[in-house]
Amino acid sequence: MEVLIVSLLNGLVYGMLLFMLASGLTLIFSMMGVLNFAHASIYMLGAYFAFEVSRWVGFIPALIIAPIACGAIGAAIEIFGLRRVHHNGHIAELLFTFGLVFIIQRGLQMIWGMLPMPYRVPAFLDFPLFVLYGANFPAYRGFMLLISAVMLLSIFLLLKKTRIGLIIQAALTHPQMVSALGHNVPVVFTTVFAGGCLLAGLAGVIGGNYLTTESSMADAMGPIVFVVVVFGGLGSLAGCFIASILMGMIQTFAVVFDVTLGDLLAPFGVNANWDNLLGEIFTVPMARIGPLLPYAMMILILLFRPRGLMGTRDT
Amino acid sequence: MPKIARLLAVAALTVMAYVLPAAAEDTIKIGLIDPLSGAFAQQGDANLKHFNYLFSRINAEGGPLGKKIEVVPVDDKLQPAEALIALQTIIDQNINFVMSCTGSNIGAALLDGVAKHNARNPDHRVLYLNCGALASDLTNDKCDFWHFRFDSNTGQRAETLVRGLPKDLKTVYILNQDYLFGQTLHRETKENLAKLRPDIKIVGEDMIPLGKVKDFTPYITKIQGSGAEALLTGNWGPDLNLMMKAGVDAGLKLQYYTYLSHVVGGPTSVGETGDKRLHTVVEFHPNVPAEQNSAAGEEFVATWRKDHDFDLFQMNNYMMLKMLTAAINKAGSTDPLKVALALEDSTAKDMMGHTYTMRKSDHQLLEPLYVAQFVKGARYDSEKTGLGWKTDAVVESADLNQPTTCKMKRPAS
């Protein structure tokens, strides 16, 4: 029981971090049709900026400055890069963002070096919030949950309850009409892209010291975020949210429960301890393949429900 | 292109064609295949910086046959397929020696690639100097004449670590990465525990996919639930850094016995919370010379620290270059076969007077190993953390002369 509760909390924290990252990506993806490979790189930039800012003026200013800087970079990428390659179709956009990944990583390595940054949890949040069955639940994790919940709420309100949200939604489906009504559609797109990057930067600020800030952090986060977006379904923030939490839980629980596929089949009278090629699949403990489960689930959902959990169109 | 420019280009090329080979004769090139980009780039970068330092020292001491040695780095992105392409690049430049310091999966691919190349091209052989692929298989069942391992293998490290465990330790948890190195280390850690410390109970174990886990909190929960007093792990790079961090955040009262936490980036990620909790098995660390009163060793460390902000620990690679230099001098040429024969059973001593031997039967280096812990107030700190390594135990090379299952096929000559 205690393992269950601790794992639920752990899964929730990790899932919310995934959601912060994935929500920006799914916004950009569903609104602009751009598969932004560089999204995790922006997340990494956010962490490095936050480290640098918090060194000079503290963590709270970093929490505001770093995401804004990431948003500004996002706007620059959209105006000077994506908008130009947009005419050449989706492949050109895809390749453009793919190239950005390498440029950002190399650039970071040239400026900050290859060593991990000593970006630590600020002292005022570095205490155990409560003790659960002998394990500390750090206050910083509670803070992460708070930030991500606030973010979730503000995106929802922004998109559904404000005029800007209405225009953004309209510009997605009927750009010509929105343009004819006197709105500047390219500016809307820039805003969306910058907003997505801002969210990624925010995830970087709070993820950078929760995990570690190093030049490989984008490689580590990139693939799983795409899994979340595909699994949750295009254009659906709700789907993205459910998928994030689900992935967080799956990875947590797979580690904690040491069972094999064979064990699961045992109650049905199947003895799966075969000594052949397939035997390995049924006898490998779940913990050993836990981190790969999200990818397996992505393949399943692509096969049986290509639009994702709550998606509105096919991927 | 204007005519003048074209003429100039031709002239420049002609001059280069004459000048380059002449310059090449004065240098002996040694290839280095390591991850210089991608997720594990910090590893390759640190190795290259070590080599730049060590090469300049060897050159200052007078290189082999009075020539200079020069390192030629090629990126493998920690992918075996890329490593084989890198090997071909190096062979195509007529380089006789190739080093690789990261990844046992890379090591296995290179060992095989070099063996095949040498069998097919007896006039154009290449010698593989392994400086960091540690899975003991490479000098056991998979052993090859053209492969020399200038670093202690997983078996030697596991024995050292188990011998260094405190006497009152009762329960341990073992966690490793699920690939050749991690699997071998996992098996050998358990074997050594059973043999040397039957009183210790293994309360849990796990294998994780290499470089795939972002959040180690669930593993920490599991370790905590198992009631282990110490965690034994061969994790390195992000897999180690993230795990230590998750454990520290959860306030886990645990001793970490690691094989590779001294490697670049480890001390930074652990920071102050590692005080008296983090232990490692290492070839050398910056505080060794002071502990053993070696002025020459102190100078070796102090010179490095002038322009590097991470630790100098690759004494084995310095000894590798020294032994290679001696072997080339003894052979009187850079012919890989002659150098290989000269390397066998050769010995050398480091500044502190410890002996290094290249064992002929399996081409495994016997070197001293240190069990060190991370403490505040060490003479030299690591990566500006304020904490540094302090030796708890030294195991001499003679005590690490473990048996090998190698049945080496030797060339006919």
Image: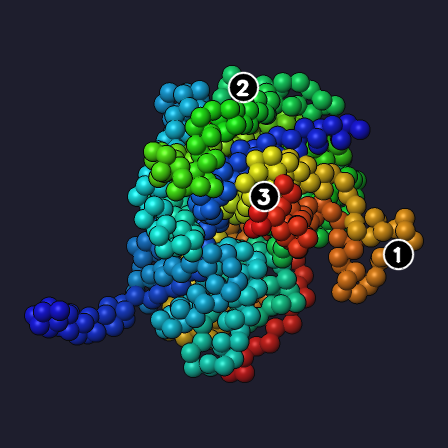
Q: Position of residue B346 (x, y in %)?
A: 50, 64
User: Which numbered circle lies on residue A183?
Assistant: none
Q: What's the CA distance linking mark 3 and mark 2? A: 40 Å
Instruction: Work out whether residue B232 or residue B411 is closer to the camera in this orientation and state it.
Output: B232
Q: Which residue is labeled 2 in the image?
A: A125
Compared to residue B184, the image places residue A41 above or below, namely above
Which callout, 1 or 2, points at the residue further toward the start of the chain? 2
Q: Residue at x 62, y 51 (%)?
A: A306
Q: What's the CA distance linking mark 1 and mark 2? A: 51 Å
Q: Residue at x 82, y 63 (%)?
A: A275
Q: Residue at x 84, y 49 (%)?
A: A263
User: Which numbered circle lies on residue A271?
Assistant: 1
User: Which numbered circle lies on residue A312?
Assistant: 3
Residue found farthest to the left: B4
Question: Which quadrant would residue A19 be assigned to in this image?
Answer: top right
Q: Secondary structure at mark 2?
A: helix
Chain designation of label 2: A
Q: Are marks 1 and 2 on the same chain?
A: yes
Q: Residue at x 66, y 50 (%)?
A: A305
Q: What's the CA distance linking mark 1 and mark 3? A: 42 Å
